[in-house]
Image (cartoon, helix red, strand yellow):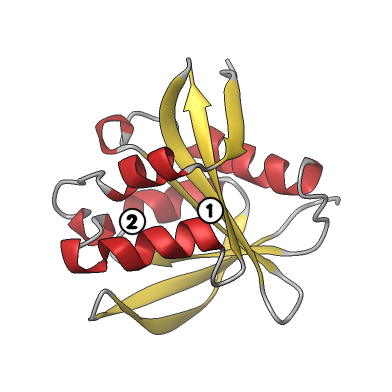
Amino acid sequence: MSQVYRVKKMNRQEAQTYLHWRYPAPYEFYNTPVPYYEESLAEIMDNQAGELFFAVYLAEEFYGIFSYQLLEDGRMEIGLGIRPEDCGKGQGLEMTEKAIAFARKHLDFQGTLCLRVADFNLRAIKVYERAGFVKTGEVLALCFNEVVNFIQMELVEETR
């Protein structure tokens, strides 16, 4: 049964809460290191990279985040996260579907959606595949001074 999610533009307090989320191994890669905290907060609040951040509420609790960035090639890259204590509880597919629907309805984006996911995050990769994403490549990226291999994925939809 679908749950009621509320999505809103992320404010400073929500961004600070999000940046303090701490994931256990092997997902600690998603923890924002203290030296990068202010820079990350500025990126969220100032839209420095053209990325839009939204807070996702479930049962009136701050539950997760959606991010969206229009790429130079016309695709839109989406990002999503669930607070650490709720990861692995079977909500990933519904959150992914909500992120897609939000882009389509509220951002009025009808083009190709894509995402990147760390290659070790097999749990998320399975969820994204179930949501209709397919692997299109891999790319190395520098994240918090660490080189990480990302799987690139694109949403394949029957009808748009």
Q: Are marks 2 and 1 in contact (CB under 8 Å)?
A: no
Q: Which residue is mark 2?
A: 122
Task: Determine whether, in the image, residue 114 is placed left or right of residue 60.
Answer: right
Percent across and percent down for residue 55 are 51, 38
What is the tally of numbered marks visible in this picture?
2
Occupied quadrant, residue 14: top left
Q: Dot 2: few (<14), some (14–19), or many (≥20) neighbours within 10 Å?
A: few
Q: The residue tagged with tag 2: helix, strand or loop?
A: helix
Residue 23 screen position, x and y as percent: 21, 46
Between the residue at mark 2 and the residue at mark 1, the CA separation in whole angstroms equals 10 Å
Q: Position of residue 120 (x, y in %)?
A: 28, 64
User: Residue at the location (51% across, 51% down)?
Assistant: 128
In-front residue for pair 36/61: 36
- Residue pictured at 44% horizontal, 37% vertical: 64
Q: Is residue 90 above or below residue 134?
A: above
Query: Three-letter amino acid code at disc 2?
Result: Leu
Q: Is residue 143 above or below residue 63?
A: below
Dot 1: element: helix
Q: For the point 59% across and 46% down, which residue is it?
A: 131
Q: Is residue 48 above or below residue 84?
A: below
Q: Which residue is mark 1?
A: 129
* Crowd tier of the residue under label 1, counting other residues whose Cα lies within 10 Å: few below 14, some 14–19, many 20 or above: some
The answer to which of 134 and 85 lies nearer the viewer is 85
Q: Position of residue 29 (x, y in %)?
A: 23, 61
Which quadrant of the view contains residue 17?
top left
Who is closer to the viewer here, 108 or 10?
Answer: 10
